[in-house]
Amino acid sequence: MGLGSDMYRQQILDHYKNPRNYGELEDPDIEHVGENPMCGDTIKVSFIGDGCAISQASASMLSGELRGESLSAVREMDRDDIVDMLGVDLSPMRIKCAVLAEKVAQDGVAIHQGEDVEVTKTE
Ligand code: FES
């Protein structure tokens, strides 16, 4: 992780240790799985995940941010939104971790809308 205030770092650690909205949804409308090909860690949205602090904190925070959002709003998110949400500077390697949950959510929406996506990978 690059520069960033202690507050943001603590928030990331808190979401990593105490992930929000973690667990399987019963009968979800959208279910999709993705992975960070650099390390093979996976996140599913509602979410269930297993990975580094950045990927899990990002999924936890995003799971709160996405509540009540429209599907088009989910699709319009970009990596800057995730970096802003996390509030820390990240190396290119760690950006892949940070955007994994966002990518999974967006690809899940795309599938729900009839598009052809298999496994999500961060680039
Ligand atoms: Fe695997 Fe970050 S190192 S998701």
Image (cartoon, rainbow, N blue to C red):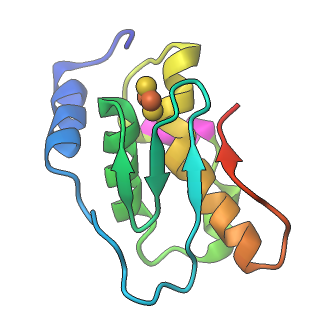
Residue at 55% across / 17% down in the picture? 93
Residue at 50% across / 49% down in the picture? 101
Residue at 22% across / 52% down in the picture? 19
Q: Nearer the viewer, residue 86 or 103?
A: 103
Quadrant of the rendered image holding ligand 1: top left
| Residue 71, picture quadrant | bottom right
Q: Nearer the viewer, residue 99 or 40?
A: 40
Q: Position of residue 35 (x, y in %)?
A: 57, 43
Rendered position, 95 above or below 50: above
Residue extent of the magenta highlight? 79-84
Q: Position of residue 99 (x, y in %)?
A: 55, 39
In the rendered structure, the answer to whether residue 109 lies left or right of residue 59 reads right
Q: Is residue 19 magenta?
A: no
In the rendered structure, the answer to whether residue 30 lies left or right of residue 90 reads right
Rendered position, 3 above or below 28: above
Rendered position, 80 above or below 95: below
Rendered position, 87 above or below 91: below
In the rendered structure, the answer to whether residue 12 lies left or right of residue 41 reads left
| Residue 68, picture quadrant | bottom left
Which quarter of the rendered picture does the C terminus lie within? top right
Which quarter of the rendered picture does the N terminus lie within? top left
Q: Is residue 83 magenta?
A: yes
Q: Position of residue 122 (x, y in %)?
A: 65, 36
Residue at 17% across / 20% down in the picture? 6
Residue found farthest to the bottom: 27
Q: Nearer the viewer, residue 3 or 15?
A: 15
Q: Position of residue 115 (x, y in %)?
A: 84, 70
| Residue 67, picture quadrant | bottom left
Residue found farthest to the top: 2
